[in-house]
Amino acid sequence: MTALADAVDTPFGGGQAAPNRRPARRGRPRSWRIVVLAFTAIFYLLPVLCSVKFSLINQKGTYGVQNYTAIVNNGALRAALFLSLEIAAITAIVVVLLVFPTTVLVRLKLPKLTILMEAVTILPIVVPPVVLAAGLLQMKETAPLWIVNAFFNHPVTVLTPMYVVLAMPLMYRAVDTGLRAIDLHTLVDASRSLGAGWPTTLWRVVLPNAQTAVLGGMFLTIALVLGEVVIANQLDQSKLTFPLEMIEFASQDNAPGISVAMTLTALAFTFLLLFMLTFVARRRRTNTTGAIS
Amino acid sequence: MLPFLLYMVVFLGLPLYVVVHGALTSGGHFTLSNFSAIFSQSQYLIPLKNSLILSLWSSLGPAIIGVWFAAAVVAGPRDSLLRRVVSSASGVFAYFAGAPLAFVWVASLGTLGVITVFFKSTFGYDLSQHFDISSQVGVGIVYFYFQIPLMVIFITPALEGLKPEWEEAARNLGATRLSYLRHVAVPVLAPSFIAAWLILFGSAFSAFATMLALDGCTEVVVPCKIYFEMSNNVLTNSIPFGLALGTEMILVVGIVMLVYWYVQRRAGRWLR
């Protein structure tokens, strides 16, 4: 268990049960806690509440839900939403397929490579997307025509691979935390000694035990795809993705109300997915602790 | 293992290689002229300065706020509602990143934003005269909005690693809470804090989505300049300069990551 894996954690379940619970607080209440929590609550809730109000003012200046119904009624917007959800779904599946077996393998057989995994998966957080996009634009200029046709000419084919790279860190962290919470060696040994092959072991034994962690990583991937604009903006503007439509509505069509409504919908959607998962994670933890450990 | 690494090489390594390669060649020959241009002309140096200043304060501020906030949350019971809300929300805010969150602030502090309108109608004070959401300060505030959650994600494990026994031991030996913080908690946490701050710095330095969403390249930073150079290729052949700037960003991020690795190795010493 190396340094980085300890220092990073995904914000959802799958972690170990707390071995070192805080000592019970006695005596005077901790006023600094209240101050800090109140400050952050205001800093986060105030703009969100303002946005709710802002999004409920429609273009005629009266209150209404037109900005929200536009997401479904406006054809371009609906297309963008489906495009983004399609990209998000493919991205989430590909990133699981790439990261999950690799992480299991590294934890089981190649713990020395953990350092390498951490190094590789920290990169997408700090490598500027604008530089990635610049590199891709250059490749598009010089690539043979068939690659351009097969790869660069549709948002799904050009954006999905890049989003998989961007989603790698959060999926790795999610899976790594999830695997640390279960007794991987015992599970795999048991499964293998009962005659299961590697694919069966991964799919039917390890994956169900790391379910919440993997799902959490997939939900965060959806959040990422619904928010990424830099690469999409530079590479493909023939079909706009959902976040690009957000910008388009605010700058081109002068309807920031719709952009804000889209933002809030996307935020609420992914927040609820993750929030519900914390309850599942907790139930599983209490159910399975006895069984596994 | 192999498919994973191969994928990263092709889709992360290759674009970066193309950028560096393009910056170092001109007409098929090796050259450093693009670099001497971006490191001598003020139109390329000013964005770098702006970028470094913006990233510095919009990573240090969230790092400090984030560590206090995370500490306040960690001090509470583990399965509390607060804990769940914070863990889910920090994931969403951190990974949604700049563009959508920019609109939350447009709705609050933009020219027609709710707070701006409220100030105008209640106090007769026109906020938009003094504050522009697409200025450096405005953009930085939006950065705070996703940097604080990122800090919470990165620092929480370190805070959880602070053993209660250490505090009890210190207290038994007569330490006040303040001296416990000063002599135990801060030294143990310092490497983790610096490591997390470095990641925040890198994330602020490479962020461009907020500016794209706010149309906010008013004071140019490096990503804006790259964007302009890469897209204005019809009039002047500015692409090599865009690529050189890209290489410059890779260099800065590379240095930050090297320091990160060094610090992170020390962070692991206590928090295992």
Image: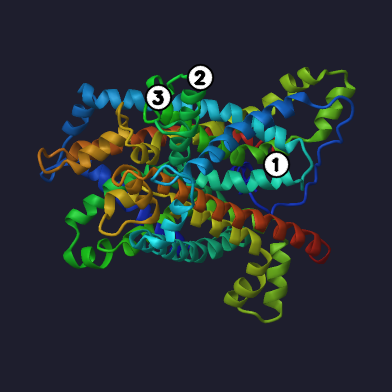
> Which residue does the numbered mark 2 point to in the structure image?
B123
Q: Chain of mark 2?
A: B
Q: Earlier in the sequence, mark 1 or mark 3?
A: 3
The secondary element bearing badge 2 is classed as: helix
Tell me, yes or no, whether dots 2 and 3 are on the same chain: yes
Q: Position of residue A255 (x, y in %)?
A: 36, 45
Quarter residue A203 falls in:
bottom right
Q: Is residue A2 visible?
A: yes
Q: Is residue B259 above or below residue B10?
A: above
Cα–Cα span, label 1 and label 3 = 50 Å
Tell me which numbered mark, 2 or 3, is placed earlier along the sequence. Answer: 2
Q: Residue at x 42, y 42 (%)?
A: A61
Residue tagged 3: B128
Q: Which residue is mark 1?
A: B272
What chain is tagged by disc 1?
B
What is the three-letter code of the residue carrying label 2?
Answer: Phe
Relative to A37, residue A220 above or below: below
Residue B228 position, x and y percent, is 23, 38
* Residue nearest the observer in this picture, A140 or B194: A140
